[in-house]
Amino acid sequence: MKKKIIFFLLISGLSFSQQKSLTIKDLPPKSEDTVFPVISYAVNPRVENKINTFLQVDQLEYIPGSSENPFKLVSTGKTSYSNYVYFYSWEKLETPKNILSLALDGEASGAYPEGFSIWKNFDLRTGNFINAKDLFQSGSVKTVENLIQKSIKKEVGDFLVQLKSEKNPSEEVADQIAIYEDCFTDFTLEDIEYYFGKDKLTFVAGRCSNHAMRALDDLGSHVVEFPYKQLEKYWSPYAKNLLSGSETADRTSFSNKLYKGKIDGKYPITVLIGKVYQDGSFSAKYWYDKTKKLIEWNGNIKGNHISIIENDYYSEETNQWIFRALVEAELKGNTIVGTWQDYKTKKYLKLELEEL
């Protein structure tokens, strides 16, 4: 018994040491509009690299190690989504030991300015982004989504009852009633924000109002909290190990993964797969490790087969995108193997990638 206690204390001490070794600073150059996290994780540099690469490519469209200012594209509206984006603050949340949850606040300006709060969650054993769907058994995903939707509908419904109970409603109240009667509440795990806490999982769904009516929206974003114990019967094996502190890292889905490999056996590239939607569609970004310039992919995965289009430019004459390359590949465990075909020359080059 004494040996078991000593072993437990040693493991606990190691775990605490690992957590203590994770530090977060501001990505330079910091300003009041560029407050962005960069992590240091001495016990696992590979995990550190994966998390920082994901965050910077995903949010800033910046490749770590390239010479330009990390905030150049977002601060000048030259990202793929053409918005000016400013980051004002970040926070590391208190979580179980295997998890890093970061909250980021900022503002995006397109046709109008819009504040935002987003959360990014990572598995500290692997450095992988944590997909909400991977946390639940496949047969329980709809059940969990229904629980979220039910909570949001109740919140909106209760507020509607309160608004409609007013005897002489003002024009403002009438507008509010219209907002909440038309509110979208059928959120899925694919289109909702979430983050981990010490003993609960929190989902954050978008508000009922559009930007023009935002001032009338007293409810704002919908926050739905579940104690971990409440979700125990729905957890996947991956989630059980993740939350229990186990070092066993089960395999997770294709979404939001980083891959590294080569085209034609001699051109090293890195790929960041984006979110995979229910119909199998996804976007991705890749870059040649030598030139470090982002290239967009639009793909689809069906079973284990992956088809990708790489666009070259948009033709004003034909009103369509001109292809640069086509990719056909197979997902085999933690590898992707297939061909990258030059659309002009029709020449096939071998594509080999392995999950980072």
Image (cartoon, rainbow, N blue to C red):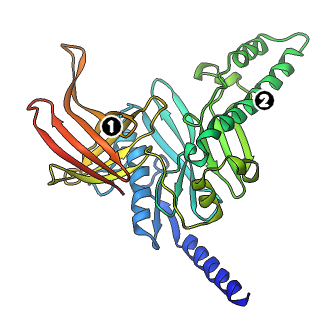
Instruction: Residue type at mark 1: give it.
Output: Ile
Image quadrant holding the C terminus, namely: bottom left
Q: State the image coordinates of residue 188 (x, y, percent, origin top left).
A: 60, 32
Few, some or many C-alpha atoms within 10 Å of disc 1 (few <14, some 14-19, many ≥20)?
Answer: some
**Separation of marks 2 and 1 at Cα, in angstroms:** 41 Å
Res. 285 image quadrant = top left
Identity of the residue drawn at 20% across and 41% down:
339
Disc 2 element: helix
Q: Earlier in the sequence, mark 2 or mark 1?
A: 2
Q: Which residue is mark 1?
A: 306
**In-image side of 345 versus 76 (left or right):** left
**In-image side of 106 versus 323 (left or right):** right
Depth order, front residue of 299/108: 299
Q: State the image coordinates of residue 317 (x, y, percent, origin top left).
A: 18, 13
Q: Which residue is mark 2?
A: 155
Depth order, front residue of 99/338: 338
Q: Is residue 334 above or below residue 23?
A: above
